[in-house]
Image (cartoon, rainbow, N blue to C red):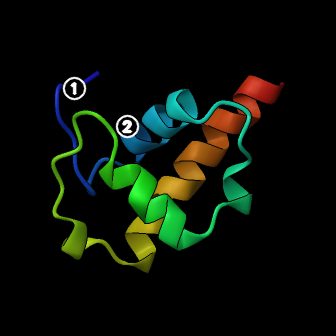
Amino acid sequence: MPGTFDWDNPEEIGIQLAEAHPGVDPLTVRFTDLHKWITELPGFTGDPKLSNEGKLEAAQMAWHEEFQESQG
């Protein structure tokens, strides 16, 4: 696990979100909340203003993969 990560690391964001919000289905999270949760993650160094829909979707899908593995 890297010490720090940013918007270009959706897989790491997904892992961190799965750990921070266990049991939460990522597909039920609004993008506004997702953005807030990502920027609050320990080690996240990305500029909040540099996010966009594509980056949020990539993080959400990476988190969804982690969520599915934990449910399986």
Left or right of 23 on screen, residue 7: left
Quarter of the rendering containing residue 65: top right
Q: Is residue 13 depicted above or below 59 in this figure?
A: above
Q: How many marks?
A: 2
Q: Amino acid at mark 1?
A: Pro
Label drawn at residue 11:
none
Residue 2, numbered label: 1
Q: Quadrant of residue 53?
A: bottom left
Q: Quadrant of the N terminus?
A: top left
Residue 9 image point, x, y percent? 30, 47
* SS type, badge 1: loop
Q: Earlier in the sequence, mark 2 or mark 1?
A: 1
Residue in the image at 50% along x and 39% along y: 17
Label 2: state its secondary structure: helix
Identify the image quadrant of the C terminus.
Answer: top right
Q: Marks 2 and 1: CB-CB under 8 Å? A: yes
User: What is the crowding at mark 2: few (fewer than 14 residues within 10 Å), some, or many (at least 20)?
Assistant: many
Query: Which residue matches tag 2?
Result: 12
From the top left corner, tell me how far across and down residue 19 is, in percent: 53, 27
Does the image show residue 57? no
Looking at the rendering, which quadrant does residue 46 occupy? bottom left
Q: What crowding class fits label 1: few (fewer than 14 Cα within 10 Å), some (14-19), or many (20 or more)?
A: few
Residue 35, x across and y down, in percent: 42, 63
